[in-house]
Image (tube, rainbow, N blue to C red):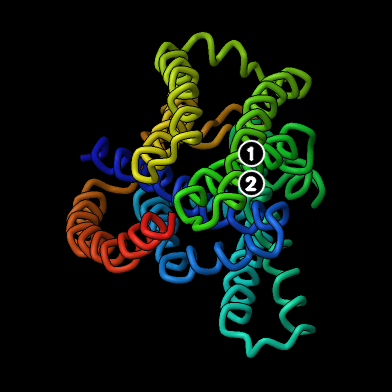
Amino acid sequence: MLLTIIFILGVSFILYTVLGGADFGAGIVETFAGKRGEKTISKALAPVWEANHVWLILAIVILFTGFPLVYAAISTALHIPLMVVLIGIILRGSFFTFRHYDIGEEGSHTYYTAVFKVSSFITPFFLGITLGAMILGRISLEITGTFYEQYIWPWLNGFCVVMGVFSTVLFGYIASVFLIGETVHSPERYRYIRLSKRFLVGTFVMGIVVFVVAEFEDHPLFYEFFSSWPSLAAFAGVVLLIPLVFYLVNHPQAVYLRLAIGAQVGLIMVGWFAIQYPILVYERQGNHLTFYNTQAPEATLYQLLIALFVGLLLVIPCFFFLYKVFKPAEANENATTQ
């Protein structure tokens, strides 16, 4: 029962990273794509962008119900970066909507676009910072130090900042690949192809920087990585998929390309999960929070599992219907135009 809940939690994080990453990354890509990119991105996101938050909400509900000590520790020690994440989500969604349905006045449209772009950088950056703080091990469950030591020091450091940059570049990579299948005009498509290759290189470089900075912050990430054969296998899978992604980027087939990038991101998440497991949050005094020492009572987990199955039976068909209604029509239109 517990393993099933852990599996659903992991899948929720992967889906949010891939689909939510494509959404947030679209605002990042738009910064480099020019005016025509704005039109394509607005058309691509408008039908589906809000729906992808379902997976984040699902993950939060699982943590809150199934692992309450983990939820309490994260939401307390990391309340500042999490608050910034939420502000970014609200601003980005609100100003994207304002821009999409704007009456067309140049002044307000420019303002909406600027906030949309900035918040698209803020949210993935602070999501990466939050994840970095969970890994680094400076979070304390005991209120013993100053405000800075308790609520700032765990996340305001080199490792967490680098993790924030890594997640931002990763989201840009996901979005640029997804947008290749949304384009109608060849010059714009080539622009996304170039951006996707640059973001891929940037993601790989920042991944190396994460490991190097971890050593300077006294966290043995290299040792943990090379001691975990599932992480090594996942990394090998990521590397082996790079030639396939490059081929599909240069010979765009939207479905296969998105599946390939989804598999890459999924393997990155699996590699991180394998290093962490069974730890969810590394704690300063060594009292690490794991799936097993923070789980809710068995009766609660049982009810949670029932609710998850019922909820997924409702949500998954709705997602298929949503994409069937909006995305195939756009893909056919693009193919016809080409």
Mark 2 and mark 1 in contact? Answer it, CB < 8 Å. Answer: yes
Residue at left 66%, top 57%? Answer: 30
Taking the image as drawn, is residue 70 in sight?
no
Taking the image as drawn, is residue 188 in sight?
yes
Q: Which quarter of the figure is the N terminus placed in? A: top left
SS for callout 1: helix
Crowdedness near tag 2: few (<14), some (14–19) or many (≥20) residues, C-alpha within 10 Å: some
Of the pair 194 and 234, the residue shown nearer to us: 194
Q: Is residue 317 left or right of residue 110?
A: left
Which residue lies under the disc numbered 2?
191
* Whole-percent x, y for residue 267 in the image: 43, 28
| Label total for image | 2
Q: Which mark is residue 98?
A: none
Crowdedness near tag 1: few (<14), some (14–19) or many (≥20) residues, C-alpha within 10 Å: some
* Whole-percent x, y for residue 68 in the image: 43, 51
* Whole-percent x, y for residue 117 in the image: 70, 62
Q: Amino acid at mark 1?
A: Arg
Which residue lies under the disc numbered 1?
194
